[in-house]
Image (cartoon, rainbow, N blue to C red):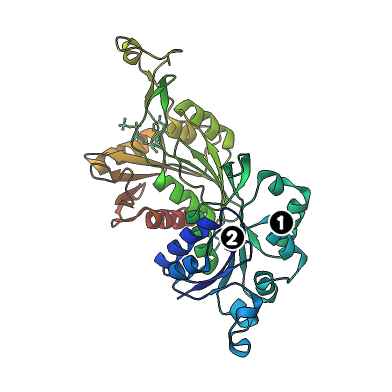
């Protein structure tokens, strides 16, 4: 079993460390927690002990047997040291090589890779001192994740939120079993999620796409070292580690954003793009005002536009969500849209929004039917195939 040493710093995001411990245990990763003094103001050692099913360490002086279980030992028996949340203070002490408590002593004594997930106020994150410390840590080989952007506990808005526990887990898994970086130097464009086509200021046309498959593909490609631009329709999923995400709302916005992101070595169009739009009413429509809905206009076909355009990526992959004659439709779609591959899936069941997917990969060589697997596993397999093709 792989093991991590999790250092929980003193910030409001410390509560998310509890969820991270739970996810790690569920994923079969052993966790030993170290709680800083600040961290103890937000979560208790008891909570982390219960979730990690392991003793929690809080001070340099509570290690029972210094000869057997000294801090050097503690810092080295894990495969990876994770700091989450990494506060501005912890990052500063790490960058400066200061060993003023158990956490920073372990960080200085370890011979294992270190991954830090920062969380702090937006101004603290953008402060020159923090910028300098993060740059120094990265130069020293520490993996410092980018914080998420959004509303903060302190009432401000911006980058500084702890990445979602799922994203931290993905980064941990990657660090624990590094995959061969086969896509370094390649730029891959992924479009994912649904689009929303406004009807009036309060209504829109949508579909059941969850974005999960596309996000998993973006994450799997980034894990292989690709530079990934993820053009995402309106979904609330966490951004996979190492992925540059651009949020869009409508099909036309998605088309323009995809176009602006070219050139790319590959484009993977997983998005469930709305085929139609209406001219949105300026004011909220009343019950009797259904007229605009009768004037559906065709949206641009983004996949066909990319596959038939002048800056066509070397590999263009489309998806085909079908409820009947899945393979037949996909084969026709591949030729019609000038795509290299179509990944076809039967969405007559629970696939849209679900966690698993059974797909058929349609290429010029024929059709491969893959056994039903989790969307994450489908993504990993597809990313490997993309790496083979580039
Ligand atoms: N797609 C796109 N732009 C659109 C519609 C679809 O880029 N306006 C892409 C999707 O991202 C997907 C592929 O085309 O990769 C298949 O989408 P689908 O809606 O199934 O295909 P359609 O061309 O709309 O075919 P049909 O109407 O027969 O379903």
Q: Which of the 4 image quadrants contains residue 88?
A: bottom right
Residue that sits furthest to the left in the current view? 324
Q: Is mark 2 within 8 Å of ligand 1?
A: no
* Mark 1: secondary structure: helix
Name the residue at the bottom extreme: 67
Question: Is residue 165 visible in this depiction of the protein?
Answer: yes
> CA–CA distance between discs 1 and 2?
25 Å
- Quadrant location of residue 292? top left
Expressed as whole percent of the image width and height from the top left, the position of residue 205 reads 36, 26
Residue at (55% x, 38% y) in the render:
246
Q: Residue 218: percent from the left, percent from the top?
A: 49, 49
10 Å crowding of disc 2: few (<14), some (14-19), many (20+): some
1 or 2: mark nearer the eye:
2
Mark 2, residue position: 41
Residue at the spot 43% in from the left edge and 16% down from the top edge? 280
Residue under circle 1? 134
Q: Is 102 in front, or is 264?
A: 102
**Residue 367 visible to an observer of this rendering:** no
Report whether 289 appears left or right of 88.
left
Residue at the image point whose x is 63% and y is 39% from the top = 156
């Amino acid at each position: 079993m792989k093991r991590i040493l999790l250092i929980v710093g003193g910030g409001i995001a410390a509560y998310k460390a509890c969820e991270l411990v739970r996810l790690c245990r569920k994923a079969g990763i052993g966790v030993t927690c170290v709680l800083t003094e600040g961290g103890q103001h937000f979560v208790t050692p008891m909570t982390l002990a219960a979730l990690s099913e392991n003793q929690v360490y809080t001070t340099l002086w509570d290690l029972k047997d210094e000869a057997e279980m000294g801090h050097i030992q503690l810092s080295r028996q894990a495969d990876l040291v994770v700091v989450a949340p990494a506060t501005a203070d912890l990052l500063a002490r790490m960058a400066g090589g200061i060993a003023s408590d158990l956490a920073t002593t372990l960080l200085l004594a370890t011979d294992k890779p270190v991954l830090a997930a920062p969380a702090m106020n937006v101004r603290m994150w953008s402060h020159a001192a923090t910028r300098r410390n993060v740059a120094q840590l990265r130069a020293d080989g520490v993996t410092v994740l980018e914080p998420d952007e959004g509303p903060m506990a302190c009432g401000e808005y911006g980058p500084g939120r702890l990445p979602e526990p799922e994203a931290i887990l993905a980064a941990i898994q990657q660090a624990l079993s590094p995959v061969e970086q086969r896509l370094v130097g390649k730029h891959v464009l992924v479009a994912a999620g649904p689009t929303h086509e406004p009807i009036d200021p309060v209504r829109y046309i949508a579909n059941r796409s969850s974005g999960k498959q596309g996000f998993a593909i973006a994450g799997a490609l980034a894990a292989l070292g690709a530079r990934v631009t993820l053009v995402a329709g309106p979904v609330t999923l966490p951004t996979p580690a190492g992925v540059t995400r651009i949020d869009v709302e409508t099909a036309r916005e998605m088309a323009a954003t995809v176009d602006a992101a070219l050139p790319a070595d590959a484009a993977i169009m997983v998005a469930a793009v709305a085929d139609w739009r209406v001219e949105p009413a300026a004011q909220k429509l009343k019950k009797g005002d259904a007229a605009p809905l009768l004037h559906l206009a065709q949206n641009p076909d983004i996949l066909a536009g990319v596959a038939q355009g002048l800056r066509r990526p070397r590999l263009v992959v489309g998806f085909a969500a079908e409820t009947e004659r899945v393979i037949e439709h996909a084969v026709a779609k591949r030729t019609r849209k000038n795509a290299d591959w179509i990944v076809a899936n039967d969405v007559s069941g629970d696939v849209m929004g679900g966690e698993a997917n059974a797909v058929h990969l349609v290429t010029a060589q024929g059709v491969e039917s893959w056994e039903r697997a989790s969307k994450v596993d489908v993504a990993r397999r597809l990313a490997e195939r993309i790496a083979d093709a580039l």
